[in-house]
Image (cartoon, helix red, strand yellow):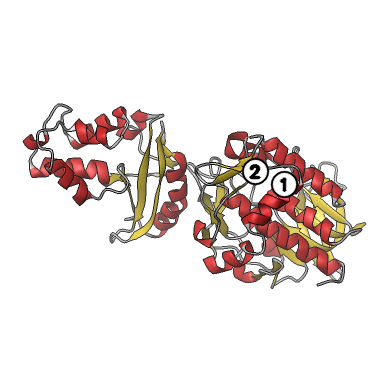
């Protein structure tokens, strides 16, 4: 049986980060990263439209959901954005900040990010093997037996490791290799998994024939809110909202999706509303209409910057003619216009699932980990990082920042133990 010091299960963003820092922290130690995919870094390569949104200029726990935010913040502070930028610059990948706060490689090439990580892992003395799909991790007296998933003809390989880092990812974008297998491995080693594991950052689906689906390609700034059946505000995001042939996408829809899915699973009365004029309330918009009685109904929508097709569709939904003057509208009809524009209730039927989700909500609770090392409290010698944990962030590089930070902490923590520095 092959023996090594640290085995990292998964060679995505968090796994590669763990491999790099394990190698750097314990020179000469045996560090092996295993990945079941036939090609590495698929999620890195597709992120940001092929540009890879490496991180965000301002990251704190408020941009995340899942585990208790103070716990997320403790791990993030051990490897903040400043260190992420310095780390990638040291690898030859300089980052640029865009108006949205997102940081991308100046080359706009995700492949440069992946190439730099793989090179850094090799230079740190870590070996990355693929395709090498892990089927199980079992504890023995001196460490762990990492066993390959069953292969045709038998002969599954086994590696004995003193320490294991579980960086398998979640279930989002399964075509990239994320299948949720890490949850079963963690459970077998004594961990729990949250009651629900569901898509995050996923496009939202409307009923077939809903008027917004006829506006495919139209995008506008909007405030999207999730409200409970009693009217309590659960979450609110303001960003670009994109109408599609199936429903809603764009940053606002993706950010709100996990909150709607979580709330709707517990409260069938959960509602999603859209305000197409962020900053305006129904009351203030109604006052603005009353202040221009001679204007046509389209005028205030054009002045607010709404795309023409969207403005016409909203008026149609409210039963308002395009040429009608505001002064001719009854209080009830004016109210219908106000609701359509500033608190449009959208009858969602779900999200597009893991196949289109950018992240996973749910996973291994952070309360079961020592956040100083990401080591398991239930299975000493096991470290966890990345999306397998119960952490999911907003659109904009926040999930990558969690991968870099937690991967760094896990890699250093595992390596220091095998080097006798823990």
Q: Is residue 36 left or right of residue 193?
A: right
Q: CA distance from mark 1 to mark 2?
A: 7 Å
Seen in the picture, residue 414 relative to 282 is either above or below; the reply is below
Residue at coordinates 48% horizontally, 41% vertically from top-left?
352
| Residue hosting label 2 | 95
The numbered dot on residue 209 is none
Residue at coordinates 55% horizontally, 56% vertically from top-left?
59
Residue at coordinates 75% horizontally, 37% vertically from top-left?
39
Seen in the picture, residue 34 relative to 325 is either above or below; the reply is below
Image location of residue 368, percent across then percent down: 64, 70
Q: Is tag 1's residue or tag 2's residue first in the polypeptide sequence?
A: 1
Q: Are marks 1 and 2 in contact (CB under 8 Å)?
A: yes
| Residue hosting label 1 | 89
Residue 10 visible within the image: no
Image location of residue 417, percent across then percent down: 82, 69
Q: Quadrant of residue 393?
A: bottom right
Q: Quadrant of the N terminus?
A: bottom right
Q: Quadrant of residue 215?
A: top left
Q: Quadrant of the C terminus?
A: bottom right
Image location of residue 323, percent across then percent down: 14, 26
Are there few (<14), some (14-19), or many (20+) residues within 10 Å of tag 1? some
């Amino acid at each position: 049986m092959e023996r090594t010091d640290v085995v990292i299960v998964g060679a995505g963003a968090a796994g590669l980060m763990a491999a790099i820092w394990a190698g750097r922290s314990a020179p000469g130690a045996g560090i092996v990263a295993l990945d079941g995919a036939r090609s590495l870094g698929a999620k890195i390569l597709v992120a940001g439209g092929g540009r890879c949104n490496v991180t965000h200029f301002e990251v704190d726990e408020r941009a995340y959901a899942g585990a208790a935010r103070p716990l997320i913040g403790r791990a993030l502070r051990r490897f903040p954005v400043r260190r992420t930028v310095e780390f990638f610059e040291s690898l030859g990948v300089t980052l640029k900040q865009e108006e949205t706060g997102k940081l991308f490689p100046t080359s706009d090439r995700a492949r440069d990010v992946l190439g730099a990580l793989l090179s850094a892992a090799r230079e740190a003395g870590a070996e990355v093997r693929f395709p090498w799909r892990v089927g199980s991790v079992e504890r023995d007296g001196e460490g762990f037996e990492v066993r390959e998933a069953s292969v045709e003809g038998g002969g599954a390989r086994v590696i004995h490791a003193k320490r294991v880092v579980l960086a398998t990812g979640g279930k989002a974008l399964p075509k990239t290799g994320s299948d949720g297998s890490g949850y079963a491995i963690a459970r077998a080693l004594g961990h729990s998994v949250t009651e629900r594991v569901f898509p995050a950052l996923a496009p939202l689906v409307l009923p077939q024939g809903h008027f917004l689906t006829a506006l495919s390609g139209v995008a506008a700034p909007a405030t999207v809110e999730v409200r409970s059946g009693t009217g309590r505000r659960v979450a609110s995001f303001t960003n670009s909202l994109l109408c599609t042939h199936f429903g809603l996408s764009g940053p606002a829809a993706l950010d709100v999706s996990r909150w709607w899915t979580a709330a709707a699973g517990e409260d069938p009365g959960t509602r999603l509303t859209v305000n197409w004029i962020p900053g305006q309330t129904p009351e203030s918009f109604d006052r603005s209409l009353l202040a221009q009685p001679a204007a046509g109904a389209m005028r205030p929508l054009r002045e607010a910057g709404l795309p023409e097709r969207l403005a016409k569709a909203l008026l149609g939904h409210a039963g308002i003619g395009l040429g009608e003057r505001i002064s001719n509208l009854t209080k009830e009809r004016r109210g219908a216009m106000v609701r359509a524009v500033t608190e449009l209730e959208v009858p969602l039927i779900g999200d597009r699932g893991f196949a289109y989700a950018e992240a996973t909500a749910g996973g291994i609770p952070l309360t079961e980990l020592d956040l100083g090392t990401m080591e398991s409290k239930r299975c000493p010698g096991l470290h966890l990082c990345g999306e397998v944990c119960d952490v999911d962030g907003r659109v904009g590089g926040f999930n990558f920042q969690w991968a870099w930070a937690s991967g760094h902490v896990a890699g250093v923590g595992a390596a220091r133990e095998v080097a006798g520095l823990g």
